Image (cartoon, grey):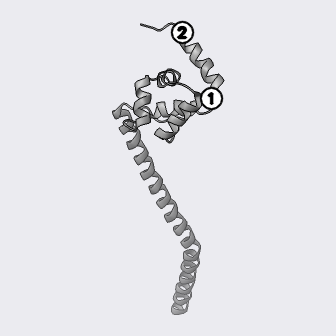
Amino acid sequence: MTSLANLLKSEITRLARKEVRALVEPLRKTNAKYRHDIATLKQQLAEQQRAIAALRRSGDKVPTDHTPIPTRFSAKGLRTLRTRLGLSAADFGLIAGVSGQSIYHWEAGKTEPRANQKAALAGLRALGKREALTRLEALATKPTKR
């Protein structure tokens, strides 16, 4: 009888293990996937922290929503804009907040404006002749700080 009892006990144990394995295997796979996802997120976080630290070391500000949007620049387009407004390079430079010589260099393709200057020039594209002359008169009447 003991052999029958042992045989029955071993069969029940085998079936129980099989059932438990069937129930645990999907959990094991899900657990492995979650661990992988967590490891990936940790790597991304470490990369972001390194980038932030590098920006702080370089003295640059962390980019915000107020950073100038990169704009295209064309020397020919600048000259066309200036002639459309009927302004000299010095007058156009006054409106743009730079010197007339800078305008000449930009139009000749010798130099290119900085990002913030490109943004200012992009804002001037919407000006008409009257508004440009109004701005020029307003700037000309302001006392200069020296």
Where does the image place residue 59, in percent across and percent down from the top left? 36, 30
Distance (Cα) linking label 2 and label 1: 20 Å
x then y, percent, for residue 80: 54, 36
Residue located at (47% from left, 52% from top) = 41
Give the SS element for disc 2: loop
Q: Taking 94 as reference, is 72 above or below it?
A: below
Figure quadrant of residue 109:
top left
Height in image: 119 above or below 38?
above
First in residue order: circle 2 vs circle 1: 1
Seen from the viewer's position, the closer of residues 67 and 3 is 67
| Residue 68 shows in the view | no
Report x, y in % for residue 72.
Answer: 50, 42
- At 57% from the left and 18% from the top, the residue drawn is 136
**The C terminus - image quarter:** top left
Nearer to us in this view, 117 or 9 = 117
Three-letter amino acid code of the residue under disc 2? Lys
Residue appearing at x 58%, y 32% in the figure: 84
**Residue 2 visible, this angle:** yes
Which residue bears the numbered disc 1? Answer: 127
Residue marked by disc 2:
142
Q: Which mark is residue 54?
A: none
As drawn, 41 above or below 56: below
Q: Residues within 10 Å of mark 2 (few under 14, many from 20)?
A: few
Q: Are marks 2 and 1 in contact (CB under 8 Å)?
A: no
Residue at the spot 52% in from the left edge and 39% down from the top edge: 77
The kind of residue tagged 1 is: Leu
* Secondary element at tag 1: loop
Query: Where's residue 66, x and y in %?
Result: 54, 32
Quarter where residue 127 is shown: top right
Quadrant location, the N terminus: bottom right
Position above or below: 109 against 11: above
Badge 1 density bin: few <14, some 14–19, many ≥20, Cα 10 Å? some
